[in-house]
Image (tube, grey):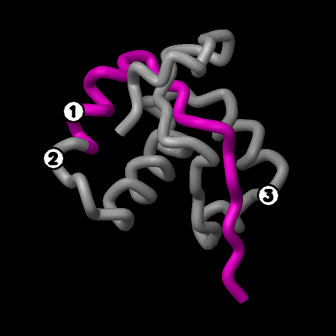
């Protein structure tokens, strides 16, 4: 069984840097999904969302395909994403 989970959009401390990484691999969905997973679950990125998901699902998080509902990148959850300035 394949499980896919959708999150709203990327929230990172420096969206410009993340966009630059994604621009280096413009058509590589595997790279993008891998980056999403790393940003969520690697401790040095300190993702509160990732911590909460890991508490809820434990080891299952490594088998889930993580996806975003939009390709917008924000630096916090309060940003108005209607401007679409940080899309990739």
Asked if labels 3 and 2 touch by Cβ distance under 8 angstroms, the answer is no
Residue 18 among magenta residues: yes
Residue 26 in percent (x, y) is at 23, 53
The quadrant of the rendering that contains the N terminus is: bottom right
Q: Nearer the viewer, residue 56 or 85?
A: 85
Measure how far apart labels 1 and 2 are at the Cα level.
Answer: 7 Å
Residue extending furthest toward the left: 24
- Along the polypeptide, which appears first: circle 2 or circle 3? 2
Determine the secondary structure under disc 2. Answer: loop
Residue drawn at x 35%, y 39% is 88
Q: Quarter of the image holding residue 52?
A: top right
**Within 10 angstroms of label 3, few (less than 14), some, or many (20 or more) residues?**
few
Q: Nearer the viewer, residue 47 or 26?
A: 26
Magenta-tinted stretch: 1-22
Measure how far apart labels 2 and 3 are at the Cα level.
Answer: 32 Å
Residue beneath disc 1: 20
Dot label at residue 24: 2
Residue drawn at x 71%, y 67% is 60
**Within 10 angstroms of label 1, few (less than 14), some, or many (20 or more) residues?**
few
Position of residue 17 relative to residue 30, above or below, is: above
Position of residue 88 relative to residue 64, above or below, is: above
Residue beneath disc 3: 57
Measure how far apart labels 1 and 3 are at the Cα level.
Answer: 31 Å
- Along the polypeptide, which appears first: circle 1 or circle 3? 1
Residue 17 in percent (x, y) is at 26, 25
Asked if labels 2 and 1 touch by Cβ distance under 8 angstroms, the answer is yes
Comparing marks 2 and 3, which lies closer to the viewer? 2
């Amino acid at each position: 069984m394949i499980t896919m989970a959708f999150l709203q959009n990327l929230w990172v401390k420096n969206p410009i840097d993340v966009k630059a990484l994604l621009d280096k691999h413009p058509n590589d969905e595997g790279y993008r999904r891998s980056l999403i997973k790393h940003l969520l679950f690697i401790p040095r990125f300190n993702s509160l969302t990732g911590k909460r998901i890991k508490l809820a699902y434990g080891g299952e998080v490594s088998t889930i395909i993580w996806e975003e509902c939009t390709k917008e990148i924000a630096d916090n959850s309060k940003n108005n994403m209607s401007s679409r300035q940080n899309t990739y």
